[in-house]
Structures are given as C-alpha cells and as structure tokens.
Amino acid sequence: MERIPLYGLMAEFGTPEALLDAARRSSREGFKRMDAYTPFPVDGLAEAIGFRRTRVPLIVLIGGIAGCLGGFFLQYWAAVLDYPINVGGRPLNSWPAFIPVTFEMTILVAALSAFLGVLALNGLPMPYHPVFNVERFELASRNRFFLCIEAADPLFDRERTGKFLESLAPEGVYEVES
Amino acid sequence: MAEPVHPSSPTPSGQSPQIIEPGHTFATLTDKISAIVLTQRTPWFWYVGFALSFVLVLVLLFSIAALITVGIGLFGVNVPVAWGFAIVNFVWWIGIGHAGTLISAILLLLRQKWRQSINRFAEAMTLFAVACAGIFPLIHLGRPWYFYWLFPYPNTMGIQPQFRSALVWDVFAVSTYFLVSLLFWFLGLIPDLATLRDRARGRVPRFIYGMLAMGWRGSAVHWHRYEMAYLLLAGLATPLVISVHTVVSFDFAIALVPGWHSTIFPPYFVAGAIYSGFAMVLTIAIPLRRLYGLEDLITDRHLRNMGVVMLATGLVVAYGYLMETFTAWYSGDIFEQYLIMNRMFGPYGYMYWLLILFNILIPQLLWVRRVHANVPLLFLIALSVNIGMWLERYVIVVVSLHRDFMPSAWGMYSGTIVDYAVFAGSIGLFVSLLFLFIRFLPMISIFEMRELVHELDERRR
C-alpha cells in the first residue's frame, strides 16, 4: 500500500483535561515536536507541550518606547527646530504641552507592535497548514481538542507513536497528510 | 468521554441571576452564536431596520455634500457661537465609544467574567461610534478639504501643526483610539472568524472568513502568545479610556471663556463618557438579546451590572455639575457666577432643567433594585441618559459661547435643518454599521464564552 507522506499523527479528545493529560504524558515520553489545538486557550497547555517564554511583551515594550521617543521628538523638532513660533517669549520646548501627544503615540505604537508582533511570531497569515487535511479538525474550532505529534520529531515512528497515542484513550487517531 | 455540561450553579443569595444560563456546552454555544451569521435566515426586522437606517445614511451623505459645496453657513454657527451641533455631536459620539473599551479592556484586567458575552458588540459599538464622531471635526471645518493640515506631514508651505493646541491633541487622541480599538476588536475576532470559516457552508463565505481568520488553527502556542498580546492590548486600551476623553475635555477645560475654564472637566467628562456609553450598550443589548433570543447569554445579571455602573457614573457626573456650580460661586468671579445664573435661568434655561431631569433625576430610579429587573424601564432609563448626555454637551458648548465677557458680543444659536440632518444621519450610520456587524460577524465572543463555561465547570468541581 502506498504510504502517504505524513506531517504527523493526531489524536482527538473530548475535554481539555484529557488533552492536558495527554500532552503531559507525551512530553514525558520524550516528544519535542508536537502541538495542541483547542477552541479556546487552555491553562497550562503551552507549558505541557514544551513552550516556554513568549517574546510579545518585549516587542510591545520596545514599540512603546519607540512611540514615546518618536512622539516627543516629532513635536520637539516641529515646535523648536522646524517651525518655531515666538509667543510672548515663552519657551519653545513647552514639554508639558507635548505630553498628551507623546502619551497617545506611546500607546499607538505599542498597540501596533502588539498586534503585528503576535501575528508575526505566530506566522500568521498562514492559510494552509497540514492539520487542515484532517476532516475532523474542523471541530477544533468548536468543541474538540487535538494533539498532534509531528513526523519531524526524532522519536517519531508511525506504528509506535500511533500505539502510544491510542494508549491515551482518545476519541480517534488520525494521520495528518503533509 | 462526555463533554462537560455546565450544570446549574447554586446562586449564593438565591436571588441574583447567573452570568450564563446553565445547560450550555461548547458545541451549543458555538452553534447558537454562529447560526445567527451562517445558517439562520436573516429575520425581517433586520431588513426593515437596515433599510431605515440606510435612508438616514443617505440623508447624511446628501447633507455633507451640500455642506461642502455650499459652505459652513448651512450650519447654524455664527459669531459668537462658533461651535454648535458639530462639536456637540463629536463629543457625544466619542463619549459613547468609551464604554466598549471599558468593557473589553478594563473589565478584562479586573477579571470580571460578566464581560464575556457583551464585549464583542460593545467593542464594535465603540468602533462605529468613533467612526461617526470622526466625521464631525472634518465637516465642521470651513475648508474641510484641508483637514490633513492637522497632521504633521512634510509640506511645501513650511509649517507644522500647533502641538500646544487641544485641537491637535484631539487629532492624535481620536486617531489613536480608533486604531487601537480596531486592532483590539479584530484581534479578538480572529479565533471566531476561524470558527465561522470551519462552519460556513458556501464557498464564498468560507473563503472570506478564511482569509480574515488568517489560517488560525487554535494551536496552544499561538493561544499563549495571543493571550499575552490580548492582555497587553487591554492594558494599553485602559489608559486610552481615561486619556482620550480627557483630551477631548481639554477642548473645554483649557480655554478662558467662563464655563470652559474648569479643572473638573477631565474626570467629569470621562465619567460622563462611561455613563453615556453604558447607556448606549444597554440601548443596544436589550433589543438585541430579545430579538435574537440571547437572554441565556446576555442575562439579567448583565443588565443589572450595567445599570449599577450607570448609576455610579451618573453620580460622578452629578458631582461634576455640583462642583462647577460651587466653584463658580466660591470663586467670586462675576463672570463665572453669571454663567451659572444664565445656564439655569437664561434663554437656554429650559435645556439645563431638561438636562437635570434626564441625566440626574430619572436615573436615580436605578437605586431601586426592582428597576434593574424591569427590562423595559431599564431601556427607557438608558435612552433618557443618552438624551441627557447630548443635552449636557449642548449646554456646555452653546451656553458658554453665547454669552461670555462682553455683553455687546452676546448672541443666540439654534440648529438649522442641516445640523439636524447630519445628526440624524450620523445616528443612521451608526445603526447601519451595527446591523451589518450583526449580520456578518459573531456578535458575542464565541471562544470567550467557551472559556467562561469551562471555568464555571471547573469551579463546580
């Protein structure tokens, strides 16, 4: 029988607790390349499959600082250097009056960084992904919880990994075509 | 393995309703909310409502076209009342928008679970309100085609915007608010767009939702980053709720004219914004949940909580009025004192007393617990607050301008037919956008409701 190229093997679960348990056991078995798919975020799941720290906060911080400095210096350059207006000899660098715009620019650039950052780090948009080849996967956005062990994992073996997944008492195990 | 069914949670006092009716599972939630968009037939009231509001949109477009061709004289503005309906409407709409962000962002940070079922359409309401608000600063300009001069772009005239002006601060604050709200709303939509993509029947809906969902597959790693970004955006949107209306209030706080020279304005405006915003959320939520049968998701508890927030912010607004009056008297400044006398007993006195009635007196009914359970009455109170807040903006703008320091410069103002047409048109635009939103997008956040059901189940165990 022709063997289809595999992306991985996927197990379906009915509850988030079952998936969490399965993920922890897979991690203990030594699998590193795996991912879990849920219709809502499940606490502790990312850690269970081996994911540690996200860089999103750092990106947002850098964005915020950039917005703050950019916003202030935009006003400074405009009001002091490029187009100074002498109003009764008042200081050109009227920094208290520059605060509202600086504040708004901080928030704007930080928010843009958060949005673009999360999309970029997640690799989105990515309209195609092998997991969509499994028909039942459309329930991942409804009420089913999936665990997928990738074929790229060093410990992956079609038969043995399949049996291991069966041992986790899933509702079904599927082959994910590449 | 059976799916967790959210059982009936024992209510502590036996009296207060729950934030979600028992019996919902992940599947029923998904199916119910996505059915409104995907499978259910569009109800007749949608067509009627959209048609009516679209007529108003056409009125808006026609009025704006007339305004730009003929000139700003079509509005009732004159000297001394150089700002009229346009600014009143601008501040009113922006204020309304604040409740959506408060519900989405601040209630998230405060871990208030009851926000889950109302935050999606409240945030949409914010976006549409800010969009409607943004029209007015553009059209109220004498030469609206030069609106872009307010932005610091490299130009051949060698000038820069005046960054010390509250009007330029407005430009940045409102633009930031619109963009951040849009990003926050859209980010929240992505997982639900994926749900719609997976459940859509036809090829075209599936394609469109698929493109918008950007290939979201619910990966745990993605969720982790997503939650972090969502929380951070909520943290960023929170100061926006305070700062944007503060900056708008600066238009009136930092001037010299009596009535526009008061440090109470920032907190009083922000409270007023939240007040009118929650009133608008109630005005939308009550008919919506009735017409679409969503009383099990937007429960009486939500209405009660929103009523309580309205009452609290209404009291802050009342305090603001009181303080304005008190400081005017206490200051001994004859101009400030005259302003207060004129507000109450001058030619616009009737507006002031209507304002007190709609904004302060009628909402005091909310002290009575049974009023919160009486949904039609709650709806009427919310409408009363909406009207009252518009009157408040009118009183602040027009009354302070029409009689300031010099009696020889005094004048009167009244709105023209074009003023009213643009105002009604903006309401039509808002309602049309809401109708489109209800038809094509999930009006309740599906994944957050699943989270809620899951959490309530866990708490049970």
Image (tube, grey):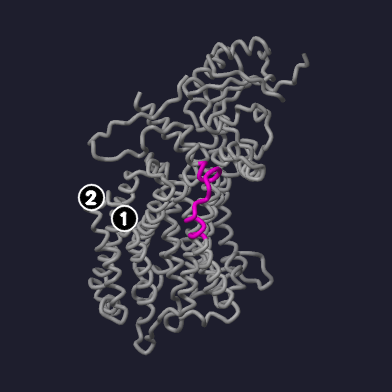
Distance, label 1 to label 2, CA atoms, is 12 Å
Q: Secondary structure at mark 1?
A: helix
Residue type pointed to by label 1: Pro
Residue B370 - label? 2
- Image: B272 above or below B116: below
Answer whether residue A86 is magenta in the image: no
| The quarter of the displayed image where residue B391 is located | bottom left
Is residue A105 visible in this depiction of the protein?
no
Dot label at residue B159: none
- Check disc 1 and report the residue beneath it: B376
Q: Secondary structure at mark 2?
A: helix
- Is residue A74 visible to us here? yes
Q: Which of pointers 1 and 2 indicates the residue nearer the eye?
A: 1
Quick check: is B47 in the magenta stretch? yes
Give whichever of B425, B394 is nearer the camera.
B425
Q: What kind of secondary structure does the magenta stretch mostly adopt?
A: helix
What's the residue at 58%, 82% (across, down)? B70
What's the residue type where badge 2 is placed?
A: Arg
Query: In this picture, which residue range is highlighted in magenta?
Result: B34-50
Q: Residue furthest right?
A: A2
Q: Could you say where residue A2 lies in the image, as x and y percent from the top left?
A: 78, 16
Q: Position of residue A70 (x, y in %)?
A: 58, 54
Choose top left, top right, bottom left or bottom right for residue B451: top left
Q: Residues within 10 Å of mark 2 (few under 14, many from 20)?
A: few
